[in-house]
Amino acid sequence: MALAIVICSGLAFAQGTSPNSWSFIASGDSRNCGDMIVPAIASNSAQFSPGFYWHLGDLRAIYKVDEDIAFSTANHMQAPACDAYERIAWSDFVEQQIGSFGNRPFYVGIGNHEVIPPKNEAAFEREFYDWLNLPVLQAQRAKDNEPAEPQPYYHWIQGGVDFIYLDNATGVFSDPQLTWLQHRLDAAKQDIRIKSVVVGMHEALPDSWSNEHSMGDGRSGPEARASGQKAYKALIAFRDESHKPVYVLCSHSHFYMDHIFTTPELTKNGGEPLDGWLVGTAGAVRYPLPKNVPENTHARTDVYGYLLGEVSFDGTIKFSFHEVHPADVPEYVQQRYPATAVQWCFEHNSLNKDPHAPDPMPRCLPTRTPAKPANAATASGR
């Protein structure tokens, strides 16, 4: 078969694939070492010619200087300062992480670290206006007769799939957002062009295998669990009534896991749970896996990587996790850092390997209280 890349309706089809199928990639949590790992994801995933990359939130640490930025400034013999870091953190993300994908579409999701002071949702909307207002999102709002100004929750339809991003950066889905979600699901139920729905968010919905670090952990108050349960029930109802597949992608927990909703709580009445994945593997400090996760739920920690979604003509999507390694970090990225930086990120950026290791970076303005302190770091401070 001849080598070929075919561009059709904005989708790229790689050599040997059917013009009736296409792919996309997703992951989240690119703080700490994301300036090295996200370019590695961009480099490694190029083999699949993905239609876009979807970031599921937590762009930079904010409550402290990210290690990759510290390594970079150390390479230039400059000590990072918190006030300077807070000014450049998001522009650094744009340059080093979004920039690594070149012209490939990049969709940005909001996470809890985006609302840690001095950052907040309004600042996120201003900083990432161009990405929340991508032409495809702008056009979608116009088709839906929605206000022109973008929100941190959004959707677009591509290749027969309705992609919906939900904002639970504060741990809660607002009532207006839940109403919006129901409208979107009602429309998708009637739209014969839509064959499946993929919902992205930062924190997982309640009662997953990672419930202790999700909308069900109780740290955001009872309204968090209640709003998450409403979203879960709405998605179940849509799937069962429309017979269209629903896939849920989350991050927040810094490891990889599939079948995240096959828990006793969500299967006790014999119902079929939602298909769900956790993929908080874009550079953040790796966490230990939850206890008592069954063998049929594939889970890995101390890895970086991305979720590849391969979309078939009928709208069904096959997902697979792809790990990235030090060799995937592009040479131009490695040149920004001391020789030990990439090695440190792969070998030592882990609370699973050493839960008592001190945080190498001091907190910025430690008297400042994050918007969601329990979600901003683990008990060890990372």
Image (tube, grey):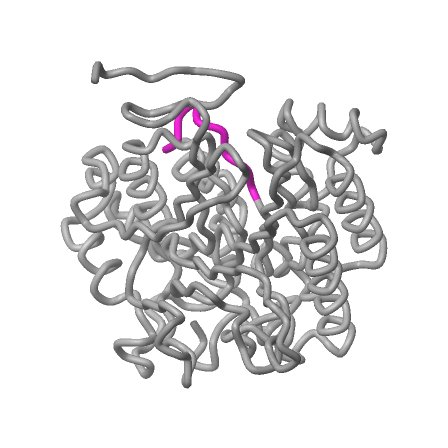
Q: Quadrant of residue 283?
A: bottom left
Q: Is residue 136 left or right of residue 94?
A: right
Eyeballing the image, is 286 above or below 69? below
Q: Quadrant of residue 173?
A: bottom right
- Looking at the picture, how far across and down is residue 367, in whole percent? 59, 73
Q: Is residue 71 left or right of residue 89?
A: left
149 falls in the magenta region: no
Which one is nearer the viewer's eye here, 112 or 138? 138
Which one is nearer the viewer's eye here, 163 or 53? 163
- Looking at the picture, how far across and down is residue 28, in whole percent? 47, 53
Eyeballing the image, is 345 above or below 367? above
> How many numbered callouts?
0
Please identify the quadrant where the C terminus is shown.
Answer: bottom left
Task: State which region is magenta.
Answer: 100-108
At horizontal 74% and vertical 34% (from top left) the residue drawn is 191
Which one is nearer the viewer's eye here, 46 or 8? 8
- Looking at the picture, how far across and down is residue 308, in whole percent? 39, 45
On the question of residue 369 being in view, the answer is: no
On the question of residue 311 being in view, the answer is: yes
